Image (cartoon, helix red, strand yellow):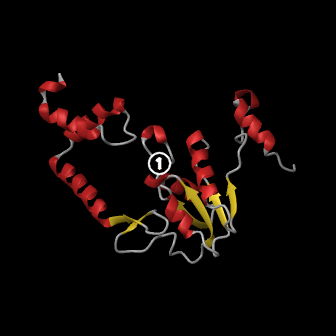
Amino acid sequence: MIDQLPHMQKMMRGLQQVPFLASKNVYRVMSHFLKMESQQLEAFCKTLVEAHAGLIECSVCFAWQEKNGTCLYCSDRSRDHSIVCVVATWQDLLMIERTRSFSGVYHVLGGVIFPLNGIGPDDLTVDELVQRVDESVKEIVFTINQTPEGEATAAFIAKKLQGRNVYLSCLAKGIPIGAMLEGIDKITIHKAMQGRHPF
């Protein structure tokens, strides 16, 4: 059916290139755009183009910043620049910021090492992180998802930082607050038992 509608076919191919857009939602998104008023659609496209032109990655932490401004995190003197929180993505950074529990600075890797998807260390900002760790940096906090790829990425970086006078830490591993033990997998329970602390 769609192969007889070349404009829709082209639009669908474009939307399928958007990461995180589930294939089951592509048709809904297409319908949404097709039903938009022309002025509304032009305004939306203009906003995308302006954002693409006006935002850049910080050359230090790789979080997004205004092209003609300064990084919200690196330029903030109230933050503790001796503690660097390493995250996989900018979205992860935002999640941590929402908790208001961290007052250091960040480093966005741009993903995790995932050979099956063709992502290696050179595709991330690992080298920039290693170069960033000087005498002023006292602690690196790994806040990468606790998946095999995330843990392998943290281990790779830790190895690269061997010999540096810097404390390496990571998020606590264990039972989520409010969870029932019977619903927790054995690996999580095992890690929680290993990481037990005084009551």
Q: Nearer the viewer, residue 166 or 73?
A: 166
Dividing the picture into quadrants, the one containing residue 26 is top left
- Residue denoted by label 1: 120
Q: Nearer the viewer, residue 152 or 32?
A: 152
Q: For the N terminus, give its image quadrant.
A: top left
Q: Residues within 10 Å of mark 1 (few under 14, many from 20)?
A: some
Please indicate, yes or no, whether residue 127 appears anywhere in the rendered image: yes
Residue most extreme to the right? 199
User: Could you say where residue 165 lies in the image, as x and y percent from the top left?
Assistant: 70, 69
* Residue under the point 47% across and 48% down: 120
Residue most extreme to the bottom? 77
Q: Is residue 92 above or below residue 63?
A: above
User: Could you say where residue 186 lies in the image, as x and y percent from the top left?
Assistant: 72, 30
Relative horizontal placement of residue 1, taking residue 142 as reference (left or right): left
Relative horizontal placement of residue 57, taking residue 47 as reference (left or right): right
Q: Nearer the viewer, residue 121 or 49?
A: 121
User: Could you say where residue 92 lies in the image, as x and y percent from the top left?
Assistant: 53, 52
Q: Is residue 74 above or below residue 85?
A: below
* Residue under the point 68% across and 59% down: 168
Query: Which amino acid type corresponds to the residue marked 1 in the rendered image?
Result: Gly
Q: Is residue 65 above or below residue 99?
A: below
Q: Nearer the viewer, residue 34 or 73?
A: 73
Relative horizontal placement of residue 186, taking residue 69 as reference (left or right): right
Secondary structure of residue under mark 1: loop
* Residue under the point 53% across and 75% down: 76
Please indicate, yes or no, whether residue 35 appears anywhere in the rendered image: no
Q: How many numbered marks appear?
A: 1
Residue most extreme to the top? 1
Relative horizontal placement of residue 150, taking residue 139 as reference (left or right): left
* Residue under the point 42% across and 42% down: 118
User: Could you say where residue 39 lies in the image, as x and y percent from the top left?
Assistant: 17, 52
